Image (cartoon, coloured by chain):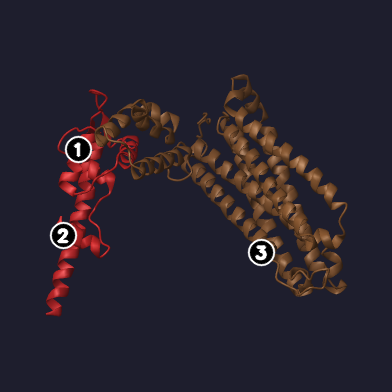
Amino acid sequence: MTSNSSMNSVGLKRTNDPPLLILTSLASGPKHGHGLTKDIESFAGVRLGPGTLYGAITRLEERGLIIPLETHDRRRPYQITQLGTAVLEQTLEELRWLAEVGTSRLRLATGMGT
Amino acid sequence: MREHHRAPRRLLRWYPAAWQARYGDEFLKLIEDTLQSGRPTARFRLSIALAGLRQRALTSGLFGDSGPPAETVRTGSIIIFCAWTAFVFAGASFSKLSQHFVPTIPLASRALPVAAYDITAACGAVGAGLVVAAAIIALPSFVRLMQNDGWNAIKINVFRAATATAILAVSLLLLSFRAHRLSPYQRNGGDGLYSLAFVGWALLFAVALSAWARTVVNTTRRLTFAPRTLRVESALAQLASGSMAAATMAAAAWCVAMAVGAPQFLYGIRLDNAAAHFDPRLAVTILLMLIAAITSSYGVVRIRAAFNKTGNSMTPTTPI
């Protein structure tokens, strides 16, 4: 949380792309809207409003990355598809690569500066 | 209490009907879970409204690539039509402001401004002809809409537009009656009351034009077009966009030619020999033309993108 605040204070934000957060949340199992909101808040510190959440759910479903399951008490859970898992893996791999490049360059710059 | 329960449901109105049918119930449940018996704050309502409008824009193909290509083509054509409506207003203003310009230019410098003016007028006429042709081609779809109870969906728009037009017509009669009793000097800024009334009438003209444009847009969104008809309609819309661009360039060229050949006309030397001052109305008019032309270009971009995506496999449009 502290690191997030310090990043926001200089204009940098953590990865808070709603579709990515939703896919990440669904990677641990199906969840409905409210479950997704709480889970995303717990692991990413980002609270998605209903409009943002369902906007992203709509796009993910249209692209076949998630599928709806049976409704319980008007709450409809969503499940990540094989395609969604593949897209998530690829995106995380790209982020990992970016993090590695950034970290190594930062180390290099810090080493040169001292 | 009943009002309290209705509040979340009312938020759904911002979303398109098809979206409401698919996600509405679960979305409402999420809102109820989020609010936990509390009332939605203004900020919460605003966020839902913006998300709903964004969804509407995506569904209609206003931006993004998630909407059906046929809807994107239709929306692109509607954007061009809306731009054309603004262009009509700008064109009327240009026509009024450029009245009697020929005698103010020395004979030797007349060729360029006269040619630019004629091209502007010709492009405007071509654009109007294209819009009329598009309306004629859409007539069978319109008749089918009326036969399928479509009148109920658009009657409120038609009544509003007709009322605005009736008020416009009556005010024009009153204005003409007053104008006949004034001297040319009084009609051209010398009579404050008449000038104010004319500005009011111009605003009323814009309101009536907007009301009819809204009626056409609401009707067009409900029409079902076969792929071939849609292709022809979108081609006419793109040509209309071209005519707007050409007219804007010609009008700008006219301004430049007048600034060189008869600057006193642009600086509005008044008939009472008061100090010359720059008249901003012409600049505002050209700016409005430019905005309309740029907006219509966006419509062309949307249409081209949809056709590039689908090639010839466009599906018919469905009412949205």
User: Mark 1: few, some, or many residues within 10 Å (few <14, many ≥20)?
Assistant: many
Q: Alpha carbon of mark 2 to alpha carbon of mark 3: how far?
A: 52 Å
Q: Which residue is mark 2?
A: A3
What is the three-letter code of the residue carrying label 3? Answer: Ala
Percent from the top left, x then y, of residue B41?
33, 41
Question: Is there one chain holding both mark 3 and mark 1?
Answer: no
| Marking on residue B283 | 3
Q: Residue at x 73, y 43 (%)?
A: B129
Foreground disc of the pair 3, 1: 3
Check the image and report above or below for B283 versus A20. below
Q: Which chain is red?
A: A
Given residues B56 and B139, the one toward you in this image is B56
In terms of image quadrants, where is residue A47? top left
Q: Colour of chain B?
A: brown
SS at badge 2: helix
Given residues B223 and B40, the one toward you in this image is B40
Q: Residue at x 59, y 37 (%)?
A: B217
Which quadrant does the N terminus of chain B fall into? Answer: top left
What is the three-letter code of the residue carrying label 1? Answer: Leu
What is the three-letter code of the residue carrying label 2? Answer: Ser
| Marking on residue A26 | 1
Q: Residue at x 74, y 69 (%)?
A: B266
